[in-house]
Image (cartoon, rainbow, N blue to C red):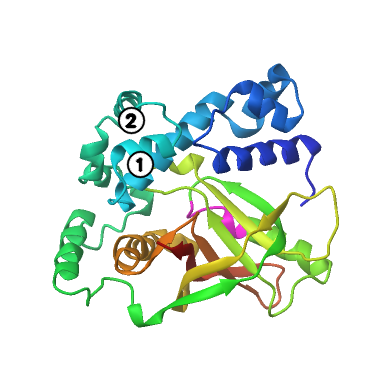
Amino acid sequence: MHTSEQEKLINKVEEYIEDNLESLLSLEKLASTSTYSPFHFQRIFKAQVGETPANYVKRLRMEKAAHLLIYEHGIPITQIAFICGFTSLSYFTTSFHTYFQCSPTNWREGAYLKRFPREYADNSKKSKQHRNMEQEQQINKGYNKYQWLNLEKVNIMEFPVCTTVKKQNVGPYTQGIPDVWETVYHWGKARDLITDNTFMFGVPKNNPYITPAQMSRYDCHLSVEGLMDDSLVTFQFKGGKHVVYEFDEPVDYEERNKLIEYYSELYSFWLPKSRYKYLDNPMELISIKPKKGSLEVEVRVKAIALAIEPK
């Protein structure tokens, strides 16, 4: 769980970028956030993240725009361009076409469906296109039938502000994450931080429709109120109002295709009919149970949540 000072500083810059995509994010500005010179910052950032700062910022802007085009039909394309840090609609349109090989308008109208990641697809079920059409018919009939969600189980909850320790997994959301959780769990257990009520949550930082699987990031958070340790990567969770959907049976990480469907219905069907808008990346509330006679643990997702506020 302990990290180098470089890792902590680069993590700080990543969070700054995510929170300020609409702003000017020059190399000099990002370097000043890290305390390194621009030359050393660019070298260290690329070594740790795998991309130059400029490419990383551009990719996150493109991915955020693509996500908003799918799920926020009420926001005009011009406004999405400015929200994501583009200075003009023409520059945004050209950049988007170069990156996704289609126009923002065509993407919004359904071209994104062709990019559905194969490793998350469930070929035993109907095609995504078919399900999308079926759900559209359902919403037009009165918002009363869903492929995955039981809307009677959707709740609005307040989560507390807290400090967490954070450890990140980079790669497909179907692989590796339980191993990271196992590390976090044993670290917390050794310090008597794990109880039946310990707040543990995961944050998928990317939309798997959009981000290549090998570049997808997932943060594992463990609440550690009162713990002071400068060697750890910590995070200030804002808490607040969330829409929460709890599963009858916790879902394995390998069943990411199922989780994607749950998220899609919250974004595309519950939110538009509610009086709320979402604010940030989704959250996954985690169930961790030790396996008998072993140091291994069973890690599953027991609920998903979105931070929301009134429209």
Q: Quadrant of the C terminus?
A: bottom left
Looking at the image, can residue 241 be seen?
yes
- Mark nearer the N terminus (1 vs 2): 1
Give the residue type that dot 2 points to.
Answer: Phe
Judging by the rendered image, the residue that carries numbered circle 1 is: 66
Give the residue type that dot 1 points to.
Answer: Ala
Tell which residue pokes out farthest to the top in this image: 39
Residue 52: percent from left, percent from top? 57, 24
Front one among 212 and 34: 34
Judging by the rendered image, the residue that carries numbered circle 2 is: 96
Residue 271: percent from left, percent from top? 35, 65
Magenta stretch containing residue 106, yes or no?
no
Front one among 254 and 293: 254
Q: Secondary structure at mark 2?
A: helix
- Rendered residue at 17%/70% (across/down): 138
Q: Secondary structure at mark 1?
A: helix
> In the rendered view, does 52 fall on the left or right side of 166?
left
Q: What segment carries the magenta color?
A: 173-179
Residue 263: percent from left, percent from top? 39, 62
Q: Is residue 51 above or below residue 106?
A: above
Q: CA distance from mark 1 to mark 2?
A: 8 Å
Magenta stretch containing residue 174, yes or no?
yes
- Classify 10 Å Cα crowding around label 2: few (below 14), some (14-19), many (20 and above): many
